[in-house]
Image (cartoon, rainbow, N blue to C red):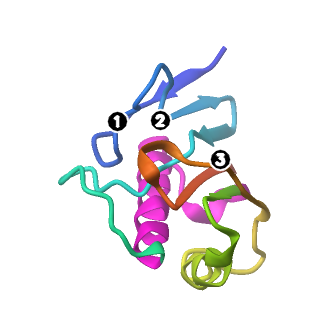
Amino acid sequence: MFKAIATDKAPGAIGPYSQGTETQDLVFTSGQLPIDPATKVMPEDISEQTRQALENVKSVLEAAGCSLKQVFKTTVFLADMADFPKVNEVYATYFSEPFPARSCVQVAALPLGAGVEIEVVARR
């Protein structure tokens, strides 16, 4: 069994899914888009989108009693792999050594025209 995670400090789901789930000592976030939960606005700049997506990930983790320090796997989805250096620059300010394992892939498109979406797995 698992428990759904919900917080108003991250954007609500735009489909039939939870912002995150937890089971025993693991926490899984759904992919977080770069939408400001207060204004419902998405920044245009990819660096700001990355920052907002990571802030949303952080909020879902905090709702589950976790932090970014407990993340051991991330997946980054990019609409354009040319944004990889800028995304990496912001990403590096949120994680420190030992860095979590990570996959980064370019996708055909992301919901709502986002440039980046990030999901993580953490352990309590």
Q: Is residue 73 left or right of residue 38?
A: right
Q: Is residue 86 above or below residue 38?
A: below
Q: Residue at x 49, y 54 (%)?
A: 57
Query: Which of disc 1 and disc 3 is earlier in sequence?
Result: 1
On the question of residue 97 being in view, the answer is: yes
Residue 51 x %, y %: 44, 71
Farthest residue in the top direction?
1
Identify the residue at the far front of this view: 108
Q: Give the number of the mark in front: 3 or 1.
A: 1
**Would you name the residue on which mark 3 appears?**
124
Determine which residue is flagged by label 1.
12
Q: Amino acid at mark 1?
A: Gly
Tag 2 near tag 1, CB within 8 Å: yes
Side (left or right) of 48 relative to 120: left
- Report which residue position mark 2 lands on: 19
Q: Mark 3 belongs to which amino acid? A: Arg
Q: Secondary structure at mark 2?
A: loop
Give the amino acid at mark 2: Gln
Q: From this view, report whether residue 109 is shown above or below residue 30.
A: below
Q: CA distance from mark 3 to mark 1?
A: 23 Å
What is the x, y in percent for residue 62? 44, 51
Q: Position of residue 9 (x, y in %)?
A: 30, 48
Judged from the image, the secondary structure of the residue bearing numbered disc 3 is loop
Give neighbour class at mark 2: few <14, some 14-19, many 20+ (Cα, 10 Å): many
Of tags 2 and 3, the one toward the viewer is 2
- Label 3 Cα neighbours within 10 Å, binned few <14 / some 14-19 / many ≥20: some
Region rendered in magenta: 47-74
Q: Residue sitting at 74 percent across and 80 percent down?
A: 97
**Quick one: 18 or 82, which is closer to the camera?**
82
